[in-house]
Image (cartoon, helix red, strand yellow):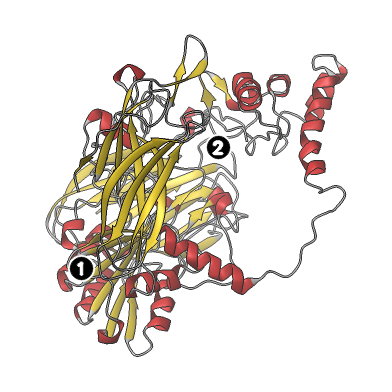
């Protein structure tokens, strides 16, 4: 699929270097290439570059036909596009034997989903050890999290799946602990796409009161015009002044929490909106507010206009995304407030150039109060945790196609929620449901156990329950490094992420991921390949050899030294000779080994020097070819990228028999 962005100055959908020279020429791809939705920006250039299918008619259709008729595009190019689309269908038998849909094997698929969730979960921390929990000793369990009682925590956009059934964490634990009282508290406001906007954290509903003063949140009203004229077409109470309209509003695309506010599909653009109510200042002092806005907006606090962002109307819109003038702006201002209630008004006009369904409206009211606010939801969650034998906090991110996370923070004050629950109950387990790392420095030291469950799918509740109670043992390992902070990573510079002036510079070269951490001497919070389980393992007796085919065999003995069965993922890394100009270590292979208590096994990991994706090949830019490395190579065996249990040296210039090796042990 051709993406939206430029690569080396050319849009991906019209890059012959990518679509033809590399994809088909070097990699031997024999299928067809389609554009992402409305990503194609040309007619002839994209067709001649190697694009075969335009998703969402934009630049082809009648234009493509006209280009052929005028002779601007050769008919043979179109013929080959058709052939590339038909070949896979014919080869897969889809023409002769059309796909027939039958009954879905629900139970079998559910069992597979549960097993995948269990195997993929990564145990990051287990002090005590607190886990596995003793099911017979638990009489009360507090489950806390805005989506712990649903399965809304998932990747949004085109990847979102609506399963035949689903098991939430609350339901999974209730099934697994029928004799215990399992109670739930949300702890924070529902999550929606507003979490992806830049600016200060959203003002929580607990700091707001709607018109009339009862309850939490704000009174919201929407008009189907930019002038606030006439009666609003929609009036309701909303938790916060926050919205992002576009792809997220399409049914089946949103991974928002249950109860998160979204706009009706038929709300026209441009539109106008007001949020009215009261700000409850919990302490006296200086409050900083931010207004993140795509369009024009105004914030009034205590009758004084604090922030005003002028209209973005009149800017030129890109037909697919909105132009640079359509980027959401962030403005902030501070004001001294006395403790108590202050009238609050947010006015917004979605008048920036944009194109639905990709994005045409965005607003969020954020703040930085002088002191942390324990909202009613956080206080309720902490009280529930205090009364329980064990507390489980299910924290999540909102991640989706279309927009990136602005930072690593857990949205909607979930870090504060974790700290409050952990302070109330020292037996607190944090279950993270996210697609990547999150900020942990503010809370990880206060919690004894952390389980990274990712977006665990339809059986997430059953899988989490089995992992926490020891019916299944964690066996996942991190496929990425978790940094200590946004500034402690190989891509900490703004021009690397999120980019400056609409351009992102991928200057890390070979130092991607854990390779970059190693090359720059940065210590991650949790390294690539890391993961705990409920037992321990020992490595010994490293042996390096080559077989008759020249394949390197890394052999060692792995023993389960604990009291429980478990699965180890033994990893082999290579340190290439200095003249290879390679990262300090590169993953060369691994073995996933299940062992009973006291069991040991001889393990072998094969490394083929000739493998196209192998770690012993480097790119010779001058010759435009891959070269196999020669010289002394270090071999490291361990549990993750920063752990070395065994190490040896391999002479890659040795042409017969066993390579020269020197074993060292750092168990």
Other-residue count near label 1 (Cα within 10 Å), few / some / many at <14 / 14–19 / ≥20: few
Task: Tell me the quarter of the image containing the N terminus.
Answer: top right
Q: Which residue is mark 1?
A: 129
Q: Position of residue 342 (x, y in %)?
A: 23, 59
Other-residue count near label 2 (Cα within 10 Å), few / some / many at <14 / 14–19 / ≥20: many
Vertical arrangement, residue 183 with respect to residue 666, above or below = below
Vertical arrangement, residue 156 with respect to residue 595, above or below = above
The first of marks 2 and 1 along the sequence is 1
Mark toward the viewer: 2 or 1? 1
* Residue 184 image-quadrant placement: bottom left
- Extreme-front residue of the structure: 657
Residue at 58% across, 33% down: 3
Element type at mark 2: loop
Element type at mark 1: loop
Q: Position of residue 365 (x, y in %)?
A: 34, 50
Which of the two residues, 58 or 548, is positioned nearer the viewer here?
548
Q: Which residue is mark 2?
A: 354
* Residue 183 image-quadrant placement: bottom left
- Extreme-top residue of the structure: 622
Which of the two residues, 497 or 126, is positioned nearer the viewer here?
126
* Res. 285 mark: none
- Mark 2 and mark 1: Cα distance apart in space: 53 Å
Vertical arrangement, residue 633 with respect to residue 343, above or below = above
Residue at 68% across, 69% down: 104
Vertical arrangement, residue 434 with respect to residue 510, above or below = below
Confirm whether residue 443 shows in the render: no
Confirm whether residue 130 shows in the render: yes
Q: Position of residue 269 (x, y in %)?
A: 58, 45
């Amino acid at each position: 699929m051709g993406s939206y962005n430029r690569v080396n100055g050319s849009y991906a959908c019209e890059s012959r270097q990518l679509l033809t020279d590399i994809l088909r020429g070097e990699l031997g791809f024999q299928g067809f290439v389609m554009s992402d939705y409305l990503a194609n920006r040309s007619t002839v250039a994209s067709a001649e570059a190697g694009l075969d299918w335009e998703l969402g008619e934009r630049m082809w259709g009648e234009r493509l036909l006209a280009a052929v008729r005028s002779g601007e595009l050769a008919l043979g190019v179109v013929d080959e596009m058709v052939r590339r689309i038909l070949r896979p269908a014919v080869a897969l038998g889809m023409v002769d034997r059309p796909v027939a849909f039958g009954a879905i094997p629900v139970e079998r698929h559910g069992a597979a989903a549960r097993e995948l969730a269990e195997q993929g979960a990564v145990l990051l921390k287990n002090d005590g050890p607190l886990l596995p929990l003793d099911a017979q000793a638990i009489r009360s369990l507090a489950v806390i999290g805005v989506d712990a009682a649903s399965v809304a925590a998932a990747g949004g956009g085109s990847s979102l799946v609506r399963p035949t059934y689903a098991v939430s964490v609350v339901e999974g634990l209730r099934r697994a602990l029928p004799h215990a009282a399992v109670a739930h508290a949300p702890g924070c406001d529902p999550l929606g796409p507003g979490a992806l906007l830049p600016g200060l954290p959203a003002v929580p509903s607990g700091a707001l009161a709607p018109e009339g003063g009862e309850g939490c949140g704000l009174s919201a009203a929407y008009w189907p015009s930019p002038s606030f004229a006439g009666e609003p077409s929609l009036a309701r109470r909303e938790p916060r002044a926050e919205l992002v309209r576009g792809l997220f509003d399409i049914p089946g695309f949103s991974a928002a929490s249950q109860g998160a506010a979204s706009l009706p599909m038929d709300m026209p653009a441009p539109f106008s909106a007001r949020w009215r109510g009261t700000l409850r200042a919990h302490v006296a002092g200086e409050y900083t507010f931010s207004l993140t806005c795509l369009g024009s907006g105004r914030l009034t606090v205590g009758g004084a206009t604090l922030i005003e962002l002028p209209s973005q109307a009149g800017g030129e819109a890109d037909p697919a995304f909105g132009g640079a003038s359509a980027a959401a702006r962030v403005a902030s201002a501070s004001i001294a407030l006395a403790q108590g209630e202050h009238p609050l008004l947010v006015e917004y006009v979605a008048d920036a150039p944009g194109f639905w369904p990709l994005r045409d409206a965005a607003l969020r009211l954020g703040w930085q109060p002088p002191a942390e606010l324990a909202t009613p939801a956080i206080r309720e969650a902490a009280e529930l945790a205090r009364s329980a034998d064990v507390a489980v906090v299910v924290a999540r991110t909102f991640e989706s196609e279309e927009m990136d996370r602005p930072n690593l923070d857990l949205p909607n004050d979930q870090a504060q929620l974790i700290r409050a629950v952990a302070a109330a109950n020292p037996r607190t387990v944090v279950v993270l449901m996210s697609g990547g790392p999150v900020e942990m420095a503010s809370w990880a030291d206060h919690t004894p156990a952390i389980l990274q469950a990712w977006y665990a799918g339809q059986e997430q509740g059953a899988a989490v329950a089995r992992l926490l109670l020891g019916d299944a043992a964690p066996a996942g390992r991190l496929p990425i490094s978790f940094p200590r902070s946004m500034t402690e990573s190989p891509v900490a510079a703004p021009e690397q992420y999120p980019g400056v002036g609409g351009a992102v510079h991928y200057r890390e070269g070979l130092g991607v991921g854990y390779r970059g951490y190693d090359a720059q001497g940065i210590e991650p919070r949790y390294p690539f390949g890391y993961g705990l389980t409920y037992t321990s393992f020992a490595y010994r007796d490293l042996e390096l050899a080559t077989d008759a085919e020249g394949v390197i065999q890394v052999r060692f003995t792995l023993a389960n030294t604990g009291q429980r069965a478990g699965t180890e993922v033994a990893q082999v890394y290579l340190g290439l000779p200095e003249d290879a100009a390679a990262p300090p270590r590169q993953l060369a292979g691994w073995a996933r080994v299940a062992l009973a208590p006291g069991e040991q096994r001889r393990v072998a990991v094969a490394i083929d020097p000739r493998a196209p994706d192998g770690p012993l090949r480097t790119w010779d830019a001058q010759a435009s070819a891959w070269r196999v490395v020669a010289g002394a190579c270090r071999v490291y065996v361990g549990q993750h990228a920063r752990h070395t249990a065994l190490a040896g040296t391999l002479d890659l210039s040795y042409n017969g028999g066993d390579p020269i090796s020197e074993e060292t042990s750092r168990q």
